[in-house]
Amino acid sequence: MTDRSAELDSFDRKILDVVAVEGRISVTELARRIGLSKSPTQARLKRLEDHGLIRGYRAIFDPIRLGRDHVAFVECKLTDTREAALAAFNDAVLRIPEIEQCHLIAGQFDYLLKVRTSSMSSYRIVLAEKISTLPFLANTSTYVAMQAVKEDGVGPTVVS
């Protein structure tokens, strides 16, 4: 199997849909839900894992209950976008735990960061003491999220 999603059949897609939401589901229950017996379901699941379509399973925490309900998206414009500058920026971002996501963007700015903190005042400190010191950073623009409509994964896989 290559990286092509066209090689996935409807059973593979159903497996991905179910485990995306319920990663701890038993193989027996998964088999029941997708309409196959246990052995072929287990073989398909293993194949999806072996080929890297399922990269792992993890716990998803409730950020609000953990006191990290302030989310800001930060546009970052760099002074230099050559490979060495991008690599230095990437390495530095990995060392800031409040940065939950970092994406290189094709557009009017270079990176988009998702930053999660406990409050606006804690975000201000992260911005001033950590984000503003990132290598090759020219300027930032911050957008504060008022509500998360959808987080933590993809929606259902469309089977044509």
Image: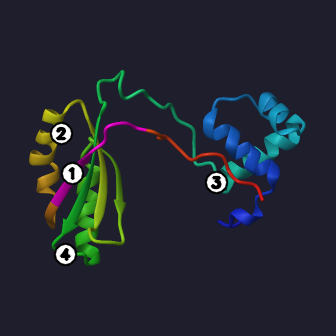
Identify the residue at the far right of this view: 37
Mark 1 to mark 2 CA distance (whole Å): 10 Å
Q: Are marks 3 and 2 in contact (CB under 8 Å)?
A: no
Which amino acid type corresponds to the residue marked 4 in the rendered image?
Answer: Asp
Looking at the image, is mark 1 or mark 2 earlier in the sequence? 2
Q: Position of residue 12 (x, y in %)?
A: 77, 50
Tag on residue 142?
A: 1
In screen coordinates, is 145 left or right of 149? left
The CA distance from mark 3 to mark 2 is 35 Å
Specify the label residue 80 is tagged with.
4
Mark 1 surroundings within 10 Å by alpha-carbon count, few (fewer than 14), some (14 through 19), many (20 or more): some
Which residue range is magenta in the image?
140-148
Q: Amino acid at mark 2?
A: Tyr
| Residue occupying image coordinates x 23% and y 56% | 92
The kind of residue on which mark 1 rests is: Thr
Q: On screen, 73 above or below 76?
A: above
The single residue placed furthest to the front in the displayed view is 146
Residue that carries the numbered disc 3 in the rendered image? 53
Mark 3, mark 1: which one is toward the viewer? Answer: 1
Disc 2 marks which residue?
123
Q: Dividing the image into 4 quarters, which one contains the C terminus?
A: bottom right
Q: Position of residue 142 (x, y in %)?
A: 21, 51
**Residue 37 vs residue 131: left or right?**
right
Residue 146 belongs to the span the image colors magenta: yes
Give the residue drawn at x 15%, y 67%.
136
Check the image and name the residue furthest to the top. 65
Element under disc 2: helix
Front residue (pair 1, 31)? 31
Q: In what quadrant of the picture does the N terminus appear?
A: bottom right
